[in-house]
Amino acid sequence: MSEIIRSLQRDLNEFGGDLHLIGADMLGGRHPGEHPDNFGAGAMAMPATPEAAAAVVRWCAENGVFIVPQGGRTGLVGGGISRPGDLILSTARLDRIEDIDPLARTVTVGAGVTLQALQEATAAFGLTPGIDLAARGSATIGGMIATNAGGILAFRNGVMRHQVLGIEAVMPDGSLFSDLTRVLKVSAGPDIKQLLIGSEGAYGFVTRAVLKLESFNPMRATALVGVRDAASALAVITHFRSLPALQLEGAELMWRRYFLDSAGERGFDLDWLEDGTAAVLLMEVSAASEAEARTALEEGLAGLWEQHGLTSGIVAASLDQARRFWALREESDFIYRLHPAAPSYDVSLPPGALDAYVADLGARLKAVHPSFDAYVYGHVADGNLHLSVIGEGAAAPAVKDAIEDAVYTGVTEAGGSFSAEHGVGTEKRRAYLTYGNPARRALAQAIKAALDPKNLFNPGKVPYRAD
Amino acid sequence: MSEIIRSLQRDLNEFGGDLHLIGADMLGGRHPGEHPDNFGAGAMAMPATPEAAAAVVRWCAENGVFIVPQGGRTGLVGGGISRPGDLILSTARLDRIEDIDPLARTVTVGAGVTLQALQEATAAFGLTPGIDLAARGSATIGGMIATNAGGILAFRNGVMRHQVLGIEAVMPDGSLFSDLTRVLKVSAGPDIKQLLIGSEGAYGFVTRAVLKLESFNPMRATALVGVRDAASALAVITHFRSLPALQLEGAELMWRRYFLDSAGERGFDLDWLEDGTAAVLLMEVSAASEAEARTALEEGLAGLWEQHGLTSGIVAASLDQARRFWALREESDFIYRLHPAAPSYDVSLPPGALDAYVADLGARLKAVHPSFDAYVYGHVADGNLHLSVIGEGAAAPAVKDAIEDAVYTGVTEAGGSFSAEHGVGTEKRRAYLTYGNPARRALAQAIKAALDPKNLFNPGKVPYRAD
């Protein structure tokens, strides 16, 4: 057992089991999540109450121990990795769904609750957290706040920031910041809790939150549609968004290579797909009934067919088939089975800029190495693309910077971001310093110095210094 | 002409007409807006470019001149008042709508553009800024960002913060902070621009913004419905929000005294209203056609009639009649004609707490003085109430604190806010210090010290010190 754990147990023993301290021995039996170094610290506290979490933070401040906050460890950019001598502060036991208010459409929820648990609890009231993503089974509300998570509904409901009404957090001085307002409208001076959203644990440790909820309608229809490019997909999306009698519930675009390999890996039948189709749009709509949703989807697509160059399409005949459509998009692990360690990216661009970007990206990658190409897929309605670069030696450290430059060139200038929804973590350090906004970076650092002068929280991550 | 104006003209003459400096002589011919002290400084700069605005701020920093940012001067809490020796920095000439992107559903807009001008420009694309309020003709985008404005669509689309994607601002050190991302998804480190939203000019001067746009559907139906309380209004609202084939476009509740006096002042016919109705709900819905909207509204209300204690109702027969319905709610000036200087408030509570709050408020006001009562009306779906207190001597300074305590008691504890959408300004100083969140206040002050150590921006307003 580590010295840190022993000292914490001794100094904070009045909290008893509420601290739930574990060392390297017990961590060894757990899954470290998406990054092998997440458990590098070999010491973890899983406080069961905000007060216990605050006591741990105060102890760390007094003893010069750095804190690495962790949620579901589904982060893809190494934002939760820890080093020997750090303490991992986990939200795992802050896992209560405290209060669902169907009239106000709000929920008060512990930071350690998974998205899926919250989705299931709110569905009983015909409501949803309004945000959804493939890692729903393990991603936690606290982690989603820390990364300002996006996902598949952001085009309609906005990102995590737009769902957060209240936050309780332990600040770097060990105080409990509690701003658990349960209303949409608060214009009562600077809204400090916004700093905790999307800051990857740099400014504090979120313990609880109040989230806004949205209507959930299970009456749906789902289709796969072959399109000639992102512009044609966006024309279809714009049409369906303008129809008052239905809601667009999903619009995901998979470019050719991604779609074909995903389908091939899953044994998904492609007889319906016209040869040479450039990309496939996965669309889901909801309406007053399943039949209406299906009719609206079929008729809407038929009306757009020629004008927008749709090549082929199928509408799911059952919920089970709809799930298979979604699996093509959400279960992207096949990429790493086919191309181990393929470097992956997550950019956002104004949707109208997507086709030019994808074309230019292909050319820039070929300029790095003629064998390079990319899997491209993502949330087309909000311009968020996920990319994995493949080709001879694409995973080699020597070409890392060249590939990054190929991926990020022009993104900021177009009004987009080098990181859309995954955060910065450790893996996007260079991108943050090269393609991030310098004024924003400097101010983030100034605020870090004001709020966390000892650099206690998640050191060595955002806000990185440029030096 | 003031010494400040003369010195600015001399020192910054390379900017020529782009500074647009005016002194007390020319301010005298303009309307000071909602507060008589808005023009107290007697000196105003109306820069036409962000660069000119930045030069003015640098000059003020060097010369120890305090800056009071102003937009449309529609603020109701004295957030824009200025004193002799200050310089008013106006957004009036930053009034360009630069770019509407219908595919991305975004607009890039100068801070001085009015909400109505933006609504009209986006309507041509079937889109809306997603936020609407009665002061639309003069309220500016910059001012709405500074106060995190709410209004009548917040229950559906969220508040101003949820519509802002990008911000450009002059910071207290005179640098131009430009984070004009045009995408929904940015997870690229701490999102510093959030500090500029809802901070009433404490941290900088917003010059431009990128806003998210929403679908606008003009196919509408509007009704006035007598209800027995907020709970019955909320049951009606919840029902309509669960219907996939229509959208709720407005849900405003007017308690009895407000509704009767507003109708009386406007000569609005009340034959349809059952005697003794406790409150009247103004509802607007949109659907695929006006006929469908009207049918859905009428049938929906008929189905809820007995269960939810609806007493009476009328559906507007024309757009003109719908406008008269809205005027009852939006043109609240009659209050001040009938009760000059009636003190007014703007609180938010979880909607389920409204009836108990209104009942308790009445009792608390009567305890201050038996003649006291309140006009109560507002955005019931998000729990935002506007209140004006009337009765013998209600406007007298001697009872000010007692009335405030009657209005604000229990609001914070219920998860609400002492200021929902109007801000703090100067008039809610005591409320901010008494009913505001102490941790939030302290952190706001720490960040003010880090970003604006000379207290250059909007001094004497938020973040107030508690001492």
Image (cartoon, coloured by chain):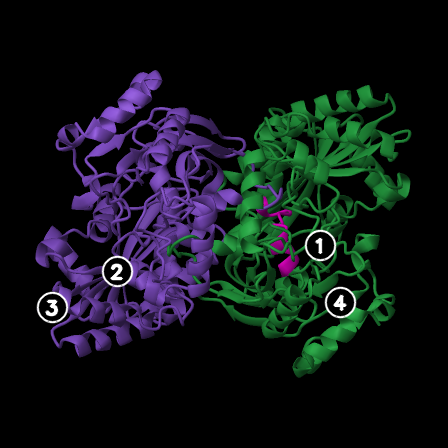
Chain colours: A purple, B green
Alpha carbon distance from label 4 to label 1: 41 Å
Observer able to see residue B393: yes
Location of mark 4 (residue): B44
Q: Is there a contact, CB below 8 Å, between mark 2 and mark 4?
A: no
Q: Residue at x 77, y 56 (%)?
A: B82
Q: Which chain carries label 2?
A: A
Q: How many marks?
A: 4
Q: How crowded is mark 2: few (under 14 residues within 10 Å), some or many (20 or more)?
A: many
Q: Nearer the viewer, residue A321 or A392?
A: A392
Q: Where is residue A159 in the image (x, y as percent from the top left)?
A: 42, 49
Circle 1 or circle 2, nearest the eye: 2
From what the image shows, is residue A427 above or below residue B347?
Answer: below
Determine whether, in the image, residue A38 is placed left or right of residue B406: left
Judging by the rendered image, the residue that carries numbered circle 3 is A391
Helix, strand or loop status at disc 1: helix
Q: Do callouts 1 and 2 mark residues in contact (Cβ within 8 Å)?
A: no
Q: How far apart are marks 4 and 3 (CA)?
A: 61 Å
Report which quarter residue B224 is drawn in.
Answer: top right
Q: Nearer the viewer, mark 3 or mark 1?
A: 3
Q: Say whether mark 2 and mark 3 are on the same chain.
A: yes
Per the model, the C-alpha gap separating discs 3 and 1 is 62 Å
Pointer 1 local density, CA inside 10 Å: few below 14, some 14–19, many at least 20: few
Which residue is at a point 14% across and 59% down the rendered structure image?
A261
**Of tags 2 and 4, which is closer to the observer?**
4
Distance from the alpha carbon under mark 2 to that under mark 4: 48 Å
Over which residues does the magenta segment extend? B141-154
